[in-house]
Amino acid sequence: MKYWLYLGILSSFVSILLWIILIFFNPYNSAPQGKDVLFRTALFLLVPAFFAVFGALIKSRIIMCIAFFWSLPLSLYLVMTPSIFKLFMVTSLCYLLSGIMMRKRVDSD
């Protein structure tokens, strides 16, 4: 089975959903987000999620690892907050796990 494919795509979609909640429906901040916050979070959370979807679909271990390391700094910051946004770290780790599982599966095929 291609569990790594499902893991990579599912974690990417969860990241995209979490980003939408963080920016537009944040239960911890009622003030509208500034353009700088939108840009920075999109750069470090949303773009790697799209990279991970692309990497999973074309079976690229390198792209999955790039998505992990790219999203890691902001995910580490968010894991220290008392909120649901700790899940960004879980999705980042799923990018890495998917890349590792992909390597194992692709090498054995």
Image (tube, grey):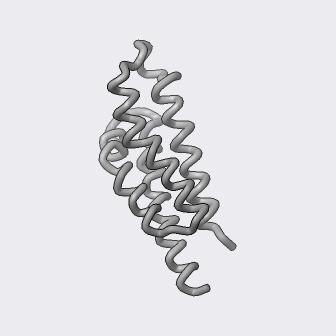
Whether 77 is drawn above or below 64: the answer is above
Task: From the viewer's side, name the closer residue of 100 and 87.
Answer: 100
Quadrant assignment, res 40: top left
Task: From the viewer's side, name the closer residue of 91 and 59.
Answer: 59
Residue in view at x 54 percent, y 40 percent: 16
Q: Residue furthest right?
A: 1
Residue 42: % across, % down? 42, 36
Label total for image: 0
Q: Quadrant of the N terminus?
A: bottom right
Residue in view at x 61 percent, y 61 percent: 57
Whether 27 is drawn above or below 81: the answer is above
Residue 97: % across, % down? 48, 65
Q: Quadrant of the C terminus?
A: bottom right
Residue in view at x 49 percent, y 53 percent: 51
Residue 88: % across, % down? 44, 44
Task: From the viewer's side, name the closer residue of 26 and 42.
Answer: 42
Residue 11: % across, % down? 55, 51
Residue in view at x 45 percent, y 62 percent: 63
Judge left or right: residue 23 versus residue 75.
Answer: right
Whether 56 is drawn above or below 24: the answer is below
Judge left or right: residue 13 versus residue 33.
Answer: right
Whether 108 is drawn above or below 35: the answer is below
Quadrant assignment, res 39: top left
Q: Residue furthest bottom?
A: 108
